[in-house]
Image (cartoon, grey):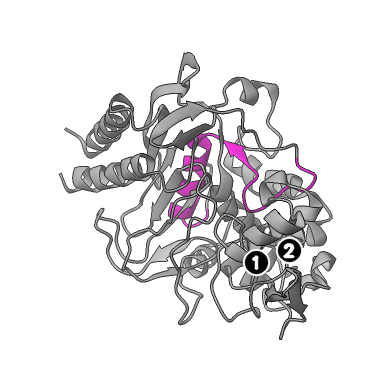
C-alpha cells in the first residue's frame, strides 16, 4: 500500500470511529504534504437535528485557527517595510493609544486601572505578550463581562475590543484578543478592512474561495451546526457568529478543511502557493516558525466559562513556545510530531498542525463547545498519531 493511501485510510478510520462511538456528531479531517492534499474525509452529520450528512465541503466557524491567516498578512507587511514589529502598535491602530492595565478591583468592585509601563508592539500582539486576554480563559475579564457589561469578543463589536491589559506588555504570555488588535494594525496600514486585505493578499493567491468573514449563500447552505456538550450529552444549538462590526483577526473566519489544507500547504512549501505564487518569502517562513517568546512559555488555559472551554493544554508537561503566529512544541510529541513543528486550535474544537521537517500537516474540524472536549481533541490526537504511524509504514 502506498504511503498516501495508508494516511488516507488512517484518517478515514479515525473519523468514522469517532462518529460511530458517539464522540462527535460529524467531522471533516484532512492531511496535506507540501505538494498535495493526500487525505480529505468526512463522517457523520452536520447537525444532530438534521440527517444531512457531513461533506468534505462543509463550512465551519474556524475561530482561532483564523489567527495564522491574520499573522500571514502582518508578515507580508513586514516584508514590504510597511510594518515595524517593534514600533508601538498604536502608530498603526490608534484605538490602542489609551489602553490601560487592570490591576484588580477595588472594594466597590470597580476596576483598578493604570497606565502600562510601555506601549504594546505588534510583535507582542503576534506573540500574545501584549497583555490582552479572553473572558473564557481569564477571571478578571470574566468579571468585567459579568459585572461591567464588557461584551464578549465573539460579538465582533468595536466595544468588544476595548478591554484593558492584564499586565505590562512583554512581561507575560496570556492568550487573548491580541490578534484582533493585529487585525486593526493591518487595517490601519492598508486602508482596507481586514477581510479585504486578507482576500487580496492570501485567500485569492491560494485559491481559498470558501474562506471569508462574511459567508456567501452557498457557504451558508453547507454550514455545519454548532453543538453543545452538557453533562456528557451533545445537543445542536443555534449559535452563530454575529455579522461583524469589526472583522476580528483572532476568530472571525468561516472556512472549509480543504481551503485550510491549502493554507497549511503554503507553509510546508516555503511560502509558495500551488501555482508558484509567492505568498511569503522562505526566510519569513523560517522566521515565523521559530520561538520568539524568549524565556516565556505557553501556559495552560483555564476554563473560566465552563460552557465555552474546559481547562486546556496540549501535551501537559512539555515546554511550548510561540512563533508568528502559532504554538511550537519544543520536544517531540507523543503523536509522532517532531520538536519544532507548529500547531494551534479553534474554540469549537478545530485543530491543525504543520510539520515542515516531514512535509506533512493536517486539520480536524468539528463544531462543539466547550473547547478541549475530550472526545474531539482525543479524535484529533488519534488522527495525528495514525498519520505518523502510517508514514512509518
The vertical placement of 75 against 27, above or below, is below
Residues at marks 1 and 2 touching, judged by CB atoms closer than 8 Å? yes
Instruction: Examine the rendering and report whether any part of residue 28 can be seen.
Output: yes
Question: Does residue 26 appear left or right of residue 61 in this picture?
Answer: left
Q: Secondary structure at mark 1?
A: loop
- Residue pointed to by mark 1: 132
**Rendered-image quadrant of the N terminus:** top left
Residue 304, position as x, y percentages in the image: 53, 56
**Rendered-image quadrant of the C terminus:** top left
Viewer-nearest residue: 152 or 38: 152
Q: Secondary structure at mark 2?
A: loop
Q: Residue 163's mark?
A: 2
Q: Which residues are the magenta region?
A: 244-271
Looking at this view, name the residue that lies furthest to the top. Answer: 51
Label 2: few (<14), some (14–19) or many (≥20) C-alpha neighbours in 10 Å: many
Q: Is residue 36 magenta?
A: no
Residue drawn at x 66%, y 60% as measured from the top left = 143
Viewer-nearest residue: 177 or 282: 177
Looking at this view, name the residue that lies furthest to the bottom. Answer: 117
Residue drawn at x 51%, y 47% as measured from the top left = 346
Q: Is residue 247 magenta?
A: yes
Of the two numbered discs 1 and 2 on the same chain, state the one appearing first in sequence: 1
Amino acid at each position: 500500500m502506498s504511503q498516501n493511501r495508508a494516511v488516507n485510510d488512517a484518517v478515514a478510520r479515525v473519523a468514522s470511529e469517532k462518529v460511530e462511538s458517539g464522540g462527535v456528531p460529524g467531522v471533516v479531517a484532512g492531511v496535506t504534504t507540501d505538494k498535495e492534499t493526500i487525505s480529505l474525509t468526512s463522517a457523520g452529520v452536520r447537525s444532530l437535528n438534521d440527517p444531512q450528512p457531513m461533506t468534505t465541503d462543509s463550512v465551519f466557524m474556524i475561530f482561532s485557527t483564523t489567527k495564522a491567516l491574520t499573522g500571514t498578512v502582518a508578515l507580508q507587511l513586514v516584508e514590504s517595510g510597511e510594518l515595524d514589529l517593534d514600533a508601538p502598535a498604536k502608530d498603526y491602530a490608534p484605538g490602542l493609544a489609551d489602553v490601560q492595565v487592570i490591576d484588580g478591583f477595588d472594594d466597590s468592585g470597580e476596576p483598578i486601572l493604570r497606565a502600562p509601563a510601555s506601549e504594546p508592539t505588534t510583535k507582542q500582539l503576534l506573540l500574545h505578550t501584549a497583555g490582552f486576554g479572553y473572558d473564557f480563559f481569564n477571571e478578571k475579564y470574566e468579571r468585567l463581562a459579568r459585572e461591567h457589561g464588557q461584551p464578549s469578543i465573539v460579538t465582533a463589536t468595536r466595544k468588544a475590543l476595548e478591554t484593558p491589559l492584564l499586565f505590562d506588555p512583554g512581561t507575560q504570555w496570556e492568550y487573548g484578543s491580541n490578534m484582533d488588535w493585529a487585525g486593526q494594525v493591518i487595517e490601519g496600514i492598508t486602508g482596507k478592512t481586514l477581510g479585504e486585505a486578507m482576500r487580496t493578499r492570501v485567500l485569492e493567491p491560494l485559491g481559498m474561495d470558501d474562506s471569508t468573514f462574511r459567508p456567501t449563500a452557498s457557504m451558508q447552505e453547507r454550514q455545519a451546526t454548532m453543538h453543545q456538550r452538557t453533562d456528557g450529552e451533545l445537543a445542536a444549538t443555534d449559535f452563530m457568529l454575529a455579522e461583524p462590526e469589526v472583522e476580528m483577526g483572532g476568530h472571525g473566519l468561516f472556512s472549509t478543511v480543504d481551503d485550510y489544507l491549502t493554507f497549511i500547504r503554503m507553509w510546508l512549501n516555503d511560502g509558495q502557493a500551488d501555482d508558484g505564487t509567492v505568498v511569503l518569502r522562505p526566510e519569513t517562513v523560517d522566521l515565523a516558525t521559530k520561538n520568539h517568546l524568549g524565556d516565556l512559555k505557553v501556559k495552560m488555559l483555564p476554563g473560566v466559562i465552563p460552557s465555552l472551554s474546559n481547562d486546556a493544554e496540549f501535551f501537559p508537561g512539555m515546554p511550548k513556545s510561540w512563533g508568528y503566529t502559532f504554538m511550537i512544541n519544543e520536544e517531540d510529541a507523543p503523536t509522532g510530531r517532531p520538536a519544532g513543528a507548529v500547531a494551534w486550535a479553534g474554540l469549537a474544537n478545530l485543530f491543525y498542525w504543520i510539520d515542515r521537517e516531514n512535509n506533512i500537516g493536517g486539520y480536524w474540524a468539528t463544531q462543539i463547545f466547550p473547547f478541549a472536549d475530550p472526545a474531539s481533541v482525543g479524535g484529533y490526537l488519534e488522527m495525528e498519531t495514525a498519520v505518523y504511524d502510517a508514514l512509518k509504514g
